[in-house]
Amino acid sequence: MAEPSGPVIALVPAAGQGVRLGEGVPKAFVDLGGTAMLVRAVDGLLQSGAVDRVVVIVPEDLVESTRTLLPVEVTVVAGGSERTDSVRAGLAVADDAQYVLVHDAARALTPPSLIARVVAELRSGRTAVIPVLPVTDTIKTVDVLGAVTGTPQRSELRAVQTPQGFAAELLRRAYAEADGLATDDAGLVERLGEPVRSIVGEPTAFKITTPLDLSLARALVEEGTS
Ligand code: CTP
Ligand code: MG
């Protein structure tokens, strides 16, 4: 197990292709007001004052060019075909971590204060911490044919953001025992039966996924509010 004084290491999965955004380049490298999304995401982590090291995970052919975009102390490694593979590649070079944050490059406008709050929860003794927001739409479950199979109580539903924070030993165990894929890291920890704590997220930590999201992000940057 890591020493109590070990560092907080942030893993930044940025190896996706950005198919839904459709900009023709991997999403993390899309420009947002003169700065690539990935660079903004890394800057936010460094500005939080709560992160000791940053590991960025990018498509294999972009490893060298990414190094020139980021501060020299940021580690850059190649990811895999699924997000889970990319996080695993990052974990492999974060051996000495006491706490690990996993933070999507696609959440480029995440306020540093949210990052600091996740780390503060870890330091207070929680072993898995995720930022969440209430959902505004009613959510239905449907079957493969589109027939509605249920309407979960909206008051119990939350949309999940990053950074997600973990005691490093717990996240390693979750990945070691992961059978199959997960859309978020906490999901793997839940499968171990371990508790996951939610904290209140931030609207500007939204994931830039579609062209509409990118328009919103660009407007916020232009306004100077993010
Ligand atoms: N990601 C990754 N490795 C993958 C897939 C995704 O590191 N094989 C990263 C993305 O770069 C992104 C984050 O995980 O920062 C969240 O994924 P998502 O929003 O789905 O991004 P993309 O996979 O790039 O987008 P799309 O699914 O539309 O192709
Ligand atoms: Mg994806």
Image: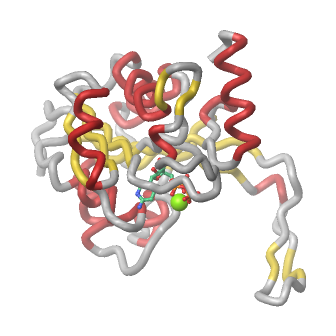
Residue 170 at least partly seen: yes
Q: State left or right for residue 24 relative to residue 190.
A: right
Residue sitting at 52 percent across and 19 percent down? 34
Residue 197 location (% of width, % of height): 51, 47
Find residue 163 and report its horizontal and vertical position in percent: 46, 40
Q: Tell how many labels.
A: 0
Where, by quadrant of the figure, is residue 185 drawn? bottom left
Q: From this viewpoint, which residue is outermost toward the top?
A: 224
Q: Residue furthest front?
A: 24
Q: Is residue 223 above or below residue 193?
A: above
Q: What residue is drawn where x is 37% and y is 80%?
A: 179
Outermost residue, bottom direction?
A: 145
Tell me if residue 216 comes above or below residue 34 in the rendering. Answer: below
Side (left or right) of 95 relative to 134: left
Q: Is residue 8 visible?
A: no
Does residue 169 appear to the left or right of 193 in the view shown? Answer: left
Q: Is residue 221 left or right of residue 59?
A: right
Residue 61 position within the rendered picture, expressed as x and y whole percent measured from the top left: 27, 52
